[in-house]
Amino acid sequence: MQAIDTQLTRDILKKVRQIEVRTNRLVNDSLAGNYQSVFKGRGMNFDEVREYVPGDDIRTIDWNVTARTGIPHIKKFTEERELTIMLMIDISGSGEFGSSTSSKRELMAELGSVLAFSAVRNNDKVGLVLFTDATELYIPPKKGRGHILRIIREILYFQPKGVKTDVKGALDFVNRVMKRKCVSFLISDFALPGEFEEEVKLMQPKLQITNRRHDLISLFVSDPREYELPDVGWITLEDAESGEQVEVNTSDPEVRREYSEIARIRQKLIHKSMRLAGIDLLDLRTDRSYLPPLLSFFRARKKRAL
């Protein structure tokens, strides 16, 4: 038993190390400067009081010190650079699915790693919320490589108790624990339970509240097989979160068309919900590189901020 546990630990550390090397390289080569230019500090911090010199902005004069000393003084401020990044990652049952080289959960882990290492390079704090239909794990924001490696490990290997998805509950949790404004990345496949359209409507006000309190950004992760069925005859499809099974004839073009149409409608509903809440949304898939859309997002945000 001990030998098995030791090997499992080695495998976990190896996987974490592989992700660290790959994502660190991406950050160093492509993302670090873009991240820094987009996510700036919350405002200005008071630094010191010094004597006024010609050319200083008179709006910064400290009248109390000026009156006390009889010499004009101004307040000097420095930009507050430090941010808090909160990663909200969906680890419900549907995330285990993947028809290409990686599952949705593995892609979410790599996305979280890239964002975390970008934050560390910028001297920002990073926290983590793993959720299903409950908050499964919360790691308070901290700095440092060791902290980031723990976050990667938990995203990849944490064993949740639940299998369903409750985005609303995750948003409520972040709003409770984060007293100060943060940049929050919601990473999910949005495989919502029950009537999808109704669930999206219920999620809408929570998205709006969170985006008002924080800077909320959504990363929508999907797999190509969720949009198109292959023509392979009769197959059994199982909902990873409800356990419901259904047999479908994939050789029937009408079945494949309806399947794709339902997936597209769901995608449009998520896009509409995020747009109404004023939230940036990135569409990411397991069969495509996430780097181009992530870079495009950074550049678009930078352009909007100018």
Image (cartoon, rainbow, N blue to C red):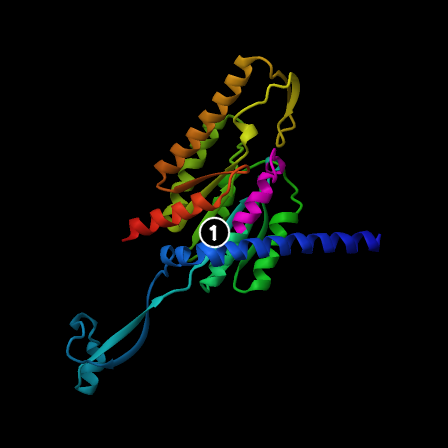
- As drawn, the residue found furthest toward the front would be 29
Name which residue lies at 60% across and 63% down: 146
Number of disc labels: 1
Q: Is residue 177 visible?
A: no
The type of residue carrying mark 1 is Arg
Q: What crowding class fits label 1: few (fewer than 14 Cα within 10 Å), some (14-19), or many (20 or more)?
A: few
The reply, left or right, for residue 104 in relation to residue 9 is left
The answer to which image quadrant residue 235 occupies is top right
- Where does the image place residue 4, in percent across and percent down from the top left? 81, 51
Does residue 7 appear in this view? Answer: yes
Which secondary structure is most common in the magenta stretch? helix
Segment colored magenta = 95-112
Identified at 36% across, 37% down, the residue is 275
Based on the displayed image, in which of its 4 quarters is residue 100 positioned?
top right
Horizontally, residue 225 falls left or right of residue 296, namely right
Image position, residue 65 (x, y; %): 23, 81
Placement of 255 over or under 15, stated as above or below: above
Q: Position of residue 97 (x, y in %)?
A: 62, 35
Asked if the magenta segment contains residue 100, the reply would be yes
For label 1, the residue is 176
Magenta residue check for 124: no
Q: Where residue 227 sits in the image (x, y, percent)?
A: 52, 27
Measured along the vertical axis of the image, is residue 195 above or below residue 179? above
Q: Secondary structure at mark 1?
A: helix
Vertical side of 154 occupied by 58: above or below: below
Q: Residue furthest bottom?
A: 69
Q: Is residue 236 left or right of residue 6?
A: left
